[in-house]
Image (cartoon, rainbow, N blue to C red):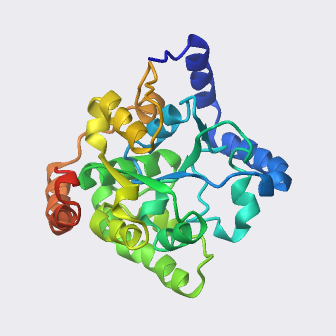
């Protein structure tokens, strides 16, 4: 058992107080400084591909502290979703040097599961990667996503209006991607509250390109409720020596309190909307499928 020191916890708390845009700028400067050495750096062995609001931040932090793991320079590299035009050297700049001692390196970008081109791109660049997918009950995920966008200042509509407007808000980005694969689909990624919960069709794109035994699907609620056994499953799946951090926490809850309960009418409408997709997920994954 490894114990997280008070110094590490203090560093986490201090980092959380730095505005997000400042943290992103610091990361950008670090990537720029490392890009000339990109050819000397590794590609990731593991991708945590989603889902958004499913616990990927917590997994990234805890897995990144494993003594045999070198995490990416920042959690969400976004190469296979929003930054593919920046090229191989830019991507490699986020990872450890090839002659380093770490057994594996990884990144966690939850947009990868949802982005329509990410699976194809990843299969071309890192065809042997292992994939970790964290799936949260889609109605709760949509509600959490909505409140995340409100907190960031991107959303001004009420929840039911935002869900009703989702198709129109996202359609232009989907059309643009069909013509320009390097288009940055900002609206699609921000406002896809319901679309992101249709997990079966998203996983199908990845299953078409990666063998089933290279993908671990985790039920987010299990990780939230009792993270230690789920973390052990991830470590075992990745072929790493057993190791458990001494202070497993939900990083998102540390930064922001949980949203209020979703209104009954909105919840019931989304539960019905997701029913077919959830059944398809069970058909696809069998006993490994999350049940909600």
Q: Is residue 77 visible?
A: yes
Residue 59 position in % (x across, y down): 45, 38
Which residue occupies the foreground of this view, 220 or 183?
220
Outermost residue, top direction? 6
Q: Is residue 125 left or right of residue 42?
A: left
Q: Is residue 44 left or right of residue 134?
A: right
Which residue occupies the foreground of this view, 28 or 48?
48
Residue 289 position in % (x across, y down): 21, 55
Q: Is residue 258 visible?
A: no
Identified at 45% across, 56% down, the residue is 155
Q: Is residue 33 left or right of residue 265?
A: right
Asked where in the image residue 184 lies, by quadrant, the reply is bottom right
Identified at 48% across, 61% down, the residue is 112
Asked where in the image residue 43 lies, by quadrant, the reply is bottom right
Which residue occupies the foreground of this view, 96 or 86?
96
Identified at 31% across, 71% down, the residue is 201
Counting every numbered tag in the picture gives 0
In what quadrant of the picture does the N terminus appear?
A: top left
Q: Is residue 55 depicted above or below 272 in this figure?
A: above
Which residue occupies the foreground of this view, 275 or 245?
245
Outermost residue, bottom direction? 179
Q: Is residue 47 left or right of residue 203?
A: right
Residue 117 position in % (x across, y down): 50, 74
Q: Is residue 188 depicted above or below 57 in this figure?
A: below
């Amino acid at each position: 058992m490894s114990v997280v020191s008070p110094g590490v916890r203090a560093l986490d708390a201090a980092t959380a107080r730095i505005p997000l845009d400042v943290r992103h700028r610091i990361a950008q400067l670090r990537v720029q400084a490392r890009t000339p050495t990109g050819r000397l750096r590794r590609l990731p062995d593991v991708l945590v591909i989603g889902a958004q609001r499913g616990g990927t931040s917590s997994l990234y932090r805890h897995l990144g502290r494993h003594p045999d793991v070198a995490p990416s320079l920042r959690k969400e590299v976004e190469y296979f979703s929003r930054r593919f035009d920046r090229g191989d050297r830019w991507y490699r700049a986020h990872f450890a040097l090839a002659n380093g001692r770490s057994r594996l390196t990884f990144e966690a970008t939850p947009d990868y599961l949802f982005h329509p081109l990410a699976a194809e791109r990843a299969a071309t660049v890192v065809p042997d990667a292992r994939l970790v997918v964290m799936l949260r009950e889609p109605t709760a995920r949509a509600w959490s996503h909505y409140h995340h966008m409100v907190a960031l200042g991107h959303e001004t509509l009420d929840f039911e209006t935002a869900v009703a407007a989702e198709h129109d808000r996202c359609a232009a980005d989907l059309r643009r991607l069909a013509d320009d694969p390097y288009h940055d689909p900002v609206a699609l990624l921000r406002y896809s509250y319901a679309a992101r919960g249709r997990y079966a069709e998203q996983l199908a794109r990845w299953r078409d390109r990666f063998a089933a035994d290279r993908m671990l699907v985790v039920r987010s609620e299990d990780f939230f409720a009792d993270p230690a056994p789920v973390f052990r499953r991830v470590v075992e799946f990745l072929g790493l020596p057993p190791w458990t951090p001494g202070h497993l926490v939900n990083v998102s809850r540390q930064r922001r309190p949980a949203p209020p309960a979703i209104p009954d009418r909105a919840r019931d409408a989304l539960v019905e909307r997701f029913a077919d997709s959830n059944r398809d997920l069970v058909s696809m994954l069998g006993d490994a499928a999350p049940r909600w």
